[in-house]
Amino acid sequence: MSILEVKNLTHTYDGNTPFMNDAVKDVSFSVKKGEIIGIIGHTGSGKSTLVQHLNGLLKATSGEVLLDGKNIWDDPKKIRLVRSRVGLVFQYPEYQLFEDTVYKDIAFGPKNMGLSDDEIAHRISEICELVGIKAEYLEKSPFDLSGGEKRRVAIAGVMAMQPEIIVFDEPVAGLDPRGRADVIKMIYDYSNKYGATVLIISHNMEDMALIADKLIVMNKGELALFDTTENVFKQHEFLKDIGLNVPMVTQVMLALKEKGLSVPDDIFTVDRAVDYLLTLSKGGNHNA
Amino acid sequence: MDNIIEVKNITFEYEDSDQKDTVLKDFSLNIKRGSFTVILGHNGSGKSTLAKLLNGLYKVTDGEILVDGISTSDEEHEIEIKRRVGLVFQNPDNQLVASIVEEDVAFGPENLGHAPDVIRAEVDEALKSVGMYEFRKSTPHRLSGGQKQRIAIAGIIAMKPDCIVLDEPTAMLDPKGRAEIISTIKKLNRENGITIVLITHFMEEAVDADRVIVMDSGKIVADSTPKDIFSNIKLLKEVGLDVPQTTELLYRLKSGGMNITTDVISIEESAQKIYDAIHLEEI
């Protein structure tokens, strides 16, 4: 059964004004427990608006969001419960750090959930181990950390609430390559350890190729594609038309195909490209 | 070619209440007029500090930076420095000041005290050079990230700068926005002869530069052509950077026994190399 289901969701900004604008139009999809779903689309395609509905931060103009088959707004008083089950990590979450120590900042969410001090301490040590925040950092001020470290602390704060579903809005924007790899790994590890479902908005197709099971492609507020990462990246012409791209290594493979080399169109990582091309070249030797 | 910017043995420290944080120490660098330089380095390597020093937004603690021979520490010529070297930042939303595009672009020339008809011409020309002239009457907050960033660049172009320093201008943009900015930057460099210093984390953006500088812990650890820099995969990984997927692919094919060189970066060139290598074996 799917853990999360979005049914015919539409969100209209500035309704009944001259600026009326359907940011999200009739979007439906469902997500199974433990899946990692990438959401791609150009700026203004409705990605961020869409995900803010998943934990009830925005209310749909029409349509619904089902968590375990139940509309999240069935009992509006219980929306807080939904928010502890569905965590949302905004763009540049480090701007939201505010406590005087890293420990207190990570503890803020769990504390609001009403957890005991012991349970909070336990969760913090567990999450810090998982995401690689060293114990000696916990008493530091978050503002003394580097950009990449701040980002990880902010994400750990949401993970410490142990949400079953966690939604990331461009979690690696503005990070250097090492910082990007760290954050992608911590998201993957969290999902793995807790069997958590992950939705992740990103512009980085190379990262998506590594981590996502499926991809949602948004275009002009509509869901244009929802399929396995493999099947979505096969639609490279369409992706290009709507201002997106496939991973660089896939573009090389496509260029090889154009030159007449017989290569499959489902290679999205350097690992697979290397394997395939080396076999091809050795096979060539063999025939000669 | 002469140097538009000369950085001479500078030191820069952030002065906190209780501690001194030295970001750059005994750092030197020359930027040639009309060149396109890319600066790479991980977060905290000193790149952004350098950018802010180049147009006098920050003042050096020691040493000297000359722009067209004028010292950035010379407060009498502060406006001269800022007109010559424009800065573009990461977040387009933080750089726009007016509610209409053309008014935003006019902000700089107005502050320089230009006459209204001169400003009109400067604004139109600047907007045309970044391909945003048709949006001159629009309101900036309804534009895409890439468009907003081009407006920010137009605001600088309107002041007729010799050099533009861009600090991760594409970090917050989608692939289309990124492509718009990079092609705008290249055009300004080639057609208008504006010197470009581009700080970025995206290795692909460095491919067409004249020169790539790699910074680590406030020092220059490599300074050469893009091909040269990207063939040194070991160094880049050491300083926490990545190589473009094309380079990684060629490099690993070579280590795997394919008879191939790794000195190209673009998708088309890489594909050609691989194609040739495979065909050569067949013959």
Image (cartoon, coloured by chain):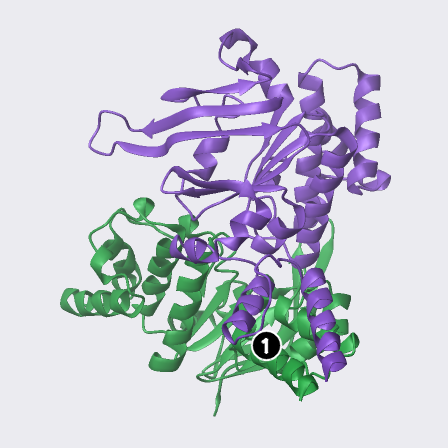
Chain colours: A purple, B green
Q: Quadrant of residue A276?
A: bottom right
- When the figure is inspected, residue A238 is found, relative to residue B128, above or below; the finding is above
Looking at the image, which is closer to me, B114 or A145? A145
Which chain does tag 1 point to? B
Q: Is residue A103 visible?
A: yes
Looking at the image, which is closer to me, A3 or B99? A3
List x then y, in percent, for residue B115. 17, 67
List x then y, in percent, for residue A127. 79, 33
Please report the residue visible at 68 percent of the width from the left and 46 percent of the height from the top.
A184
Please report the residue visible at 37 percent of the width from the left and 71 percent of the height from the top.
B83
Q: Is residue A45 left or right of residue B17?
A: left
Q: Which residue is mark 1?
A: B270
Looking at the image, which is closer to me, B125 or A127? A127
List x then y, in percent, for residue A84. 64, 20
Q: Is residue B219 visible?
A: no
Q: Are there few (<14), some (14-19), or many (20+) residues within 10 Å of tag 1?
A: many
Count how many numbered circles sit on residues in the image.
1
Indicate the secondary structure of the residue bearing disc 1.
helix
Please report the residue visible at 38 percent of the width from the left and 69 percent of the height from the top.
B184
Amino acid type at circle 1 is Ser
Q: Is residue A34 left or right of residue B264?
A: right
List x then y, in percent, for residue B207. 55, 75
- When the figure is inspected, residue A193 is found, relative to residue B11, above or below; the finding is above
Q: Is residue A250 left or right of residue B68?
A: right
Quadrant where the C terminus of chain B is found in the figure:
bottom right
